Image: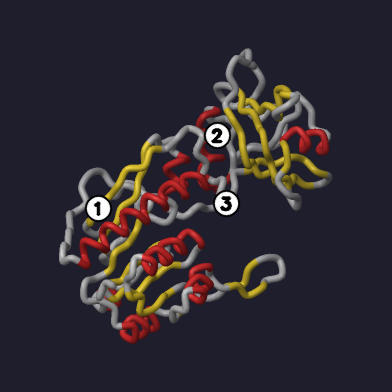
Amino acid sequence: MSKLKIVFLGTPELACPFLSRIVADGYRVSGVISQPDRLQGRGMKLCCPPVKNKAGQLSLEVFQPRTAEDLIFALSEFKPDLGVAVAYGRLIKKEALAIPRLGFLNVHFSLLPKYRGAAPVQRALMNGESMTGVTVFWLDEGLDTGPVYASRPVPVSPEDYAPELFQKTAEAGMELLSECLAGIAAGRIVKTPQSGGATLAPRISPADTRLDFSDPAASVRDLVRGLAAGPRARFMIPVGSRPAEVQVVRCSLPSGRPGSAARPGTITGIERTKGFYIQCSDGELLMEEVQPEGKKPMKALDFLNGSRLKPGDTVIGGNHQLL
């Protein structure tokens, strides 16, 4: 069994398999650090992070610091050789970074320095990338700016939505992290400065989720793909005295359809077995699965029939108003 003593920092479900893999690889996990429990849902129930639950299943000690001082205390108590962070969700300050003897490794779901920030998988899809990747790097005080231990490319299929790409990058990331930890345990420390043009992947805001049908159809679909893990891309329809939101779960670019002169946002037709078409700036987009406000995901055609919308009607996209 490796003598390397690790403290793991992570919060969401995405980070759980990484913690399990570290334990399965035989490393000593002295403790787990996650974000505090939060109130969630309509009932505002206090919920603990998935990583906390996973740590409990693995009989590991958990600490949930609320302040930078709390984090320093926890790290001092755990006395790790190395910190490993996966989607922890908070910047770690200089004083805390200095506590582990070897520093902190972080797994980031892009090929740094591209897509530094909170939403690299989502932003890669939203921008129509055909290649992304995963990077294991050393944390410093900047936002994903530290030197790289190793990276691995991950191809993006045109059919990948966010859940699929999260899965692909997570699998690549677990393998890469395992290789890096084996190297560190053997005394191989690699620190290569990041090179190339840096781009940012900021957290998804409510404004990012609004579909704008005056954009090209491929760009609209890329937004749907990137936000498929939530918060989803959405448009609005008229319901009584106020518009109602409709989230788009799945859509596709049709082929072999004749061009339409309709204004963007117009419902231009129905595909009896698949869904309905909405006009974009350069062509149509086929809506296949949607989730109306207050309901579960459903086939787009079932939604259309229930909403009494029909070809020629217009939906609200982006900052546009109903016509």
Name the spot of residue 295 as percent of width and height, x first: 75, 50
Q: Residue at x 46, y 55 (%)?
A: 203
Q: CA distance from mark 1 to mark 3?
A: 29 Å
* 230 displayed left or right of 168: right
Q: Amino acid at mark 1?
A: Ala
Q: Which residue is mark 1?
A: 150
Colouring convention used in this rendered image of the protein = secondary structure
**What mark, if any, has residue 230 been given in the picture?**
3
The amino acid pointed to by label 2 is: Arg
SS under mark 3: loop
Question: Which residue, given by chain and number where applicable, does mark 2 sit on?
Answer: 221
Please say if 151 is above or below 126: below
Above or below residue 124? Residue 47 is: below
Which one is earlier in the sequence, the residue at label 2 or at label 1? 1
Residue sitting at x 50%, y 38%: 160
Q: Residue 152 location, x and y as percent?
A: 30, 46
Q: Secondary structure at mark 2?
A: helix
User: Would you say residue 65 is visible in this rendering?
Assistant: no
Q: CA distance from mark 2 to mark 1?
A: 32 Å
Residue 249 in the image, given as x and y percentages of width and height: 63, 42
| Mark closest to the chain's N terminus, 1 or 3 | 1
Residue density around tag 1, few if under 14, some if 14–19, many if 20 or more, within 10 Å: some
- Residue 157 shows in the view: yes
Disc number placed over residue 95 in the picture, else none: none
Label 1: element kind: strand
Q: Nearer the viewer, residue 308 or 109?
A: 109
> Do the CB atoms of the residues marked 2 and 1 lie less than 8 Å apart?
no
Which of the two discs, 3 and 2, labels the residue nearer the N terminus? Answer: 2
